[in-house]
Amino acid sequence: LGQVQEQDPEKRWNETLAHLARAIPVCDIEKKSGPRAVALLGPTGAGKTTTLAKLAARHIREHGREGLVLVTTDRFRVAAAGQLQALGKLLGVPVHVVGEKQRLATVLDELIRPRLVLIDTAGLTASDPNGVTQLRELAECPHHIEKYLVISAVSQAQVMKSNYHYYKMPGLSGCMITKVDEACTLGQALELSIQEHLPVACYTDGQNVARDYHPASGHALVARAVALARQMKEQAPLMAGLAG
């Protein structure tokens, strides 16, 4: 607000939004070239596997299936590997499961000329010793892996911050904001991004793999946040009537 120079209320509002948009760090996950490995981190239910499916589908549309590989380190949840294998079969790409006695580095070593490796991880909590093991394995892997924290927009601010401090251990390249269509506000997610200098790579707002994925930009995120705020303001009298 200290940077806003305009005196007219409407112009002051627009200038404030423009400053906010420039304050949000973003990164373009799709313009990076060369062989890459991308891991999605975050708690159970954040939308990691669905977001991974969207990234895979976009890659296939732009570059084809050749060189695309899916990997899961989630050997802890029942049917977690089966879920990714079903996705791989649907997309027509290979899937590798990091077994209990394997290491991620070994699996990556065995891949032949991968163009893009998308890694789905287990959503383990800080109280689970397997979670620390998984994060340490990602941190110590000799292969360069871009790591993105998947943030559900419906989470409480304190939960987001707690997840960030837990999952930042192996080093984060940025974040992905999911479930925007279910959220009442984007304030908490954008605040975390700005305060922690955590670039936003994309946001998602639905289950449709082809349609509900959006590369991040500061202006698009602010516009969506304002639209959500207006929507909630319009719904407030209705909700109050229902409560009464």
Image: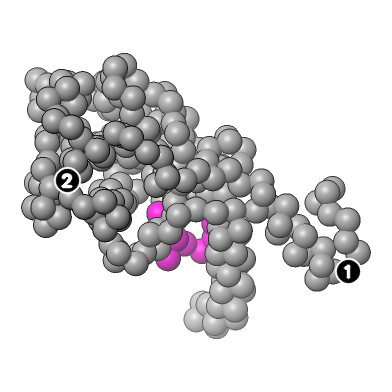
Q: Nearer the viewer, residue 101 or 66?
A: 66
* Visible residue check, residue 127: no
* Visible residue check, residue 134: yes
Q: Percent x, y for residue 16?
A: 75, 57
Q: In the visual, does 141 lie left or right of 102?
A: right
Q: Nearer the viewer, residue 68 or 50?
A: 68
Task: Evaluate if marks 1 and 2 touch, with contact meaning CB atoms under 8 Å apart.
Answer: no
Q: Which residues are magenta?
A: 177-187
- Quadrant of the drawing holding the C terminus: bottom right
Q: Amino acid at mark 1?
A: Asp
Q: Which residue is mark 1?
A: 8
Q: Nearer the viewer, residue 195 or 129?
A: 195
Q: Percent x, y for residue 40?
A: 32, 39
CA separation, marks 1 and 2?
A: 55 Å
> What secondary structure is marked by label 2?
loop
Of labels 1 and 2, the one closer to you: 2
Instruction: Tell me the residue at 38%/59% (across/down).
Output: 213
Say which mark, if any, is on residue 66: 2
Instruction: Tell me the residue at 18%/32% (across/down).
Output: 113
